Amino acid sequence: MEKRLEINFRHYDSIAQMPAEERVLVEEAQNALKQAHAPYSKFNVGAAARLRSGKIMHAANFESEVYPAGLCAERSLLFYLQTNFPDDVVEALAIASEPSERECYPCGQCRQVLVDVERRQGAPMRIIMSGAGTASVVERAADLLPFTFKL
């Protein structure tokens, strides 16, 4: 039997077209780029999350001298939030990168962790992927990884 998979997303040709609260998150992710430490890949990534309480938190990627050890911005941020604010639902998460020739999309490990966080908190998380002045938004992380790992 053949089945079909469809993923809905919104695309903005300009960050300026985005709703204000999403634009603020993209700007926070861009600000987080200043904290990135990526001397090997030269690919700086920033992430920002808005929690249900209204808090906005951000993080950046970090590469180690024992490359490829390191951690993506999204996982750095989510692990911190899940440890320090476990009951404060992550409503939205924005990602930005430098250089930015296109929108920044989460790697496979980050996609799985995003889905894990959605499962843990029992609520979807809007994912905003920005770069090169544009952005794409999915309403839930599971849309980025429809065939997830689950124990």
Image (spheres, helix red, strand yellow):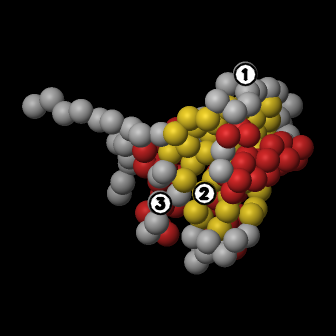
Which residue is at 58% across, 63% downward?
Answer: 91
Element at label 3 = loop
Identified by mark 1, the residue type is Glu
Q: Earlier along the polypeptide chain: callout 2 or callout 3?
A: 2
- Counting from the top left corner in percent of width and height, residue 71 is at 70, 45
Q: Earlier along the polypeptide chain: callout 1 or callout 2?
A: 2
Furthest residue toward right: 34
Residue behind mark 2 = 92
Q: Is residue 122 above or below residue 3?
A: below
Which residue is at 64% across, 30% downward?
Answer: 13
Q: Gap between marks 1 and 2, in whole Å? A: 23 Å
Q: Is residue 139 above or below residue 132?
A: below
- Quadrant (top left, top right, bottom left, bottom right) of the C terminus: bottom left
Q: Is residue 77 left or right of residue 12?
A: right
Element at label 1 = loop
Q: Gap between marks 1 and 3, in whole Å? A: 28 Å
Residue behind mark 3 = 124
Nearest the camera: 65 or 7? Answer: 7
Q: Which mark is residue 101?
A: 1
Nearest the camera: 45 or 56? Answer: 56
Identified by mark 2, the residue type is Ala
Which residue is at 69% across, 33% downward?
Answer: 14
